[in-house]
Amino acid sequence: MTTRRPSPYPYWFVLPAAVIFTVLFLVPTVASFWFSLTRWDLINTEFIGLDNYRQFFKEPFLVQGLTNTVIYAVLTSGSKTVIGLLLAVLLTSGLRGQGFLRSVVFFPVLVSTIGVGITFSVLMHPTKGLINLGLAEIGLPRVGWLTEASLALYSIAFVDLWKGVGLATLIYIAGLAAISPDYYEAARIDGATRLQRFWRVTVPLVRPATVTVVTLSLIGGLRSFDLIWAMTRGGPGFSSDVLASVIYKQYQAGFYGLSTAGNVILFLLIALIILPLTWWFNRREVDL
């Protein structure tokens, strides 16, 4: 039977942090659950049980926002993970000018998300945008990147990938630096090709970085709002609406109880996806 080691700090030592956590995080969380069960006009509240949740899942545009949220999160997270790893391998291979290229890849991370959204909205304009003008120059038809309902969400996801892949690459570069060269030398002596060394050495040993990239990018994708709002405001129609933009529109319309229920659903969605995924990643062992 193991005995619990006593804390080196007295209980009053953690009291300030506990008070801050309670006031800024615990109380708002509990209050959100309560207000999601009420009809709320910022002054008066009326308890209505689960009616807000029932209404949420009855509204087609709210369900579409929930579906778009999952598609957007999986698409951006998966692409950042794969492309971030490939860029990290390329930028640690001794390539000439790799220091400069690392700066180029990481630069979009430092730019304001709203600024990126506005810039790409101009570049993707259906008639005056630089991208469509370039396509017209080589004889290709112009594309409604942000005006066609079937393309808008994927166009924003592409911009999100461009902006966020630098951070994923940076995390992977740190993960690759932690791998001992002895593993590669042993694999080389055994006759492994470059592709075999990548799949059998790099991918398994860089798994802690993969867990970090997947977790951060998936959470970021599920709660994404600012880039989507800057580029399309959820349009055309509701085609690029995600849960966060729907919640914002409900707040603007004065449906505070309904929008708070949407926030609770978003919180539960993130928890239901991230917690099992983290558990699954952490229980797997590296098999070289």
Image (cartoon, rainbow, N blue to C red):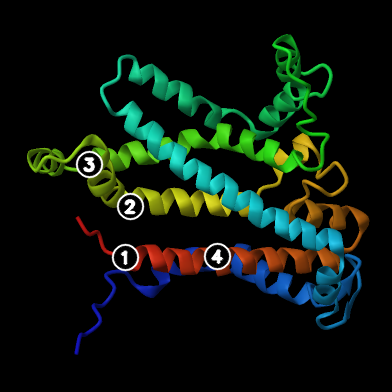
Q: CA distance from mark 4 to mark 3?
A: 31 Å
- N-term-proximal mark, 4 vs 2: 2
How busy is the neighbourhood of tag 4: few (under 14 within 10 Å), some, or many (20 plus)?
Answer: some
Residue linked to disc 2: 207
Looking at the rendering, in which quadrant would you find the C terminus?
bottom left
Cα distance between the residues tagged 1 and 4:
17 Å
Side of 38 where 286 appears, left or right: left
Which callout, 1 or 2, points at the residue further toward the start of the chain? 2
- Residue at horizontal 68 percent and vertical 67 percent from the top: 28
Q: Amino acid at mark 2?
A: Arg
Q: Are marks 1 and 2 in contact (CB under 8 Å)?
A: yes
Q: Position of residue 153 (x, y in %)?
A: 72, 43
Report the Cα–Cα distance between label 1 and label 2. 10 Å
What amino acid does circle 3 point to? Arg
50 up-or-down from 18: above or below: below
Q: Which mark is residue 197?
A: 3
